[in-house]
Image (cartoon, rainbow, N blue to C red):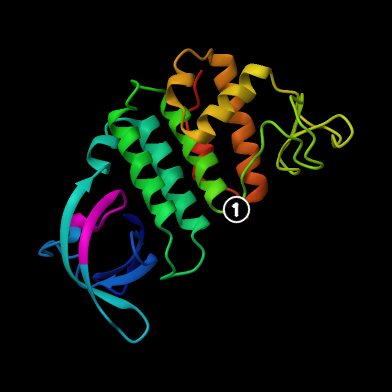
Amino acid sequence: MVLRTHKLGEADRIITMLTRAHGKVRAVARGVRRTSSKFGARLEPFSHVDLQLATGRSLDYVNQVESIHHYGASLAADYPAWTVGEAMLETADKLVFEEKQPALQQYRLLVGALATLERGTSDGPRPVSMVLDSYLLRSMSVAGYAPTFTECASCGAAGPHTAFSPAAGGVVCRFCRPPASAHPQPETLELLTALLVGDWPATSAVESRVQREASGLTTAFVNWHMERGLRSIALVERQA
């Protein structure tokens, strides 16, 4: 999955990809910016491709590209979906730190999230911001930043609890509650739990106020635990 590209020289690009078997990989696509390039359009962000690389001294080189699916073609016609997709690509890029180290779960999450964004869930369509929240929570969990919405994030006391602290890692009991903790509605915590485990049927009849609150908590959690936060998330059009 192509995550991003950078210009190199007059006609080349450096392509950053998340791969099934080798994690994050960067490779040079020679002449890809020329109009005569035979695979230039296949190496744009949102492109799901099968490619062959040649080993180079510092960076590999793209030899052959076969397109599997280009999610950008459908997302380009839907601005909210496009901004959500951009946030997903940025998240995957930041959470997979080391190059050429296996990151199969992150790869599967990203491909599945983009497919859900394009076609909807198996239980019917959902707001694109809800799809993003589910992806963010699950990808953060895989990266080792799993939030808790039941037990206290500080002492492990059984819930339910009424306070939420992004810095603590989720809900907190009244003894561990830091100053300025949020106090979400019980329905919001139920929604966040469903999004974390991918229980789409449980999200079918959620009020917009609950979804807005869940999105706010998700964004706060991600920005706190991810270095420098996500630049693209500011462009996402949340559910009104």
Q: Quick one: label 1, few (<14), some, or many (20+) residues within 10 Å? A: few
Instruction: Indicate left or right for 225 with 63 as reference.
Output: right
Image-quadrant location for residue 221: top right
Query: Residue 66, image x and y in percent?
Result: 15, 59
Q: Residue at x 10, y 63 (%)?
A: 38
Instruction: Indicate left or right for 103 with 54 as reference.
Output: right
* Mark 1, secondary structure of its residue: loop
Q: Is residue 45 magenta?
A: yes
Relative vertical location of residue 57 with respect to residue 223 in this rendering, above or below: below
Q: The N terminus lies in which quarter of the figure?
A: bottom left
Viewer-closest of 124 and 28: 124
Query: Residue 83, image x and y in percent?
Result: 41, 38
Query: Residue 202, image x and y in percent?
Result: 48, 20
Viewer-closest of 150 and 14: 150
Instruction: Indicate left or right for 162 with 53 as reference.
Output: right
Name of the residue lying farthest toward the front: 158
Relative vertical location of residue 118 with respect to residue 49 in this rendering, above or below: above
Q: Which residue is mark 1?
A: 144
Q: Residue at x 65, y 49 (%)?
A: 225
**Segment colored magenta:** 41-51
Q: Residue at x 49, y 60 (%)?
A: 96
Q: Residue at x 13, y 61 (%)?
A: 35
Q: The disc labelled 1 sits on which kind of residue?
A: Gly
Image-quadrant location for residue 161: top right
Query: Residue 155, image x and y in percent?
Result: 82, 41
Image-quadrant location for residue 13: bottom left
Name of the residue lying farthest toward the bottom: 57
Q: Is residue 53 magenta?
A: no
